[in-house]
Amino acid sequence: MTVLGLPLSTFLVFVATFVAGSLGAVHDFVVHVLRDESFDRYDVEGA
């Protein structure tokens, strides 16, 4: 079975990658843009 000319397993990997990337982009926008939390908060002193 093919979807858009791709084997089903390849298409599912593509969809999973797209969904994971979208979730990461939403997280980045909400946490670091809307809530204005920087990455410095997570740095450990002396590391």
Image (cartoon, grey):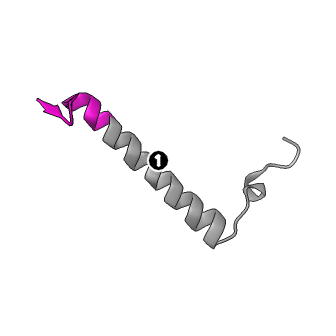
SS at mark 1 in the image: helix
Position above or below: 34 against 4 = below
Describe residue 17's horizontal placement relative to residue 27 as left or right: left
**Residue at the spot of label 1:** 21
> In the image, residue 35 lies at what x, y percent?
64, 72
Stretch in magenta: 1-13
Q: Residues within 10 Å of mark 1 (few under 14, many from 20)?
A: few
Describe residue 31's horizontal placement relative to residue 10 as left or right: right
In reply to whether residue 10 is colored magenta, the answer given is yes
Position above or below: 15 against 43 = above
Residue reaching furthest to the right: 46
- Name the residue located 46 percent from the left edge and 47 percent from the top edge: 21
Q: Which one is nearer the viewer's eye here, 29 or 42?
A: 29
Q: Which one is nearer the viewer's eye here, 30 or 10?
A: 10
- Name the residue located 28 percent from the left edge and 29 percent from the top edge: 10
Q: Quadrant of the C terminus?
A: top right
> In the image, residue 46 lies at what x, y percent?
88, 44
> In the image, residue 24 lies at what x, y percent?
51, 52
- Name the residue located 26 percent from the left edge and 35 percent from the top edge: 11
- Name the residue located 60 percent from the left edge and 65 percent from the top edge: 31
Residue reaching furthest to the front: 5
Name which residue type carries label 1.
Gly
> In the image, residue 36 lies at what x, y percent?
69, 69
